[in-house]
Amino acid sequence: MQDQGFSQLRVRLHGRTARIELIPEEFERAINIRHQIVEALEGCGFSYIALDLKGYRSGSMDEVL
């Protein structure tokens, strides 16, 4: 996905779910290429792919602690 030109990108792993964090300004571009994103992540073994609507933010894994 990073080769798609996203400026900030993180994929959090939650079992068989991939949670994508992008800056909100890049959500629309991700939606426009969603089929490519799904194909790539399903190819890595993920059953579910989610776009985190809160967007990219540092330390987001610590929010549940």
Image: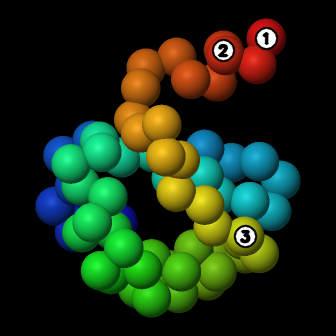
**In-front residue for pair 2/31:** 31
Are dots 2 and 1 in contact, CB under 8 Å? yes
Would residue 23 be seen by someone viewing this image from the given angle?
yes
Task: Give the residue at mark 2.
Answer: 62
Q: What residue type is labelled 3?
A: Tyr
At numbered mark 2, what does the secondary structure look like: helix, strand or loop? helix
Q: What residue type is labelled 2?
A: Asp
Are dots 2 and 3 in contact, CB under 8 Å? no
Crowd class of label 2 (few under 14; some 14 to 19; many from 20; radius 10 Å): few
Q: What residue type is labelled 1?
A: Leu
C-alpha gap between disc 2 and disc 1: 5 Å
Q: In this view, does 32 lie to the left or right of 34?
A: left
| Residue 39 position in % (x across, y down) | 53, 87
Task: Give the residue at mark 1.
Answer: 65
Residue at 68% x, 48% y: name it: 13
| Residue 35 position in % (x across, y down) | 45, 88
Q: Say the numbered circle drawn on residue 48.
A: 3
Residue at 29% x, 80% y: name it: 32
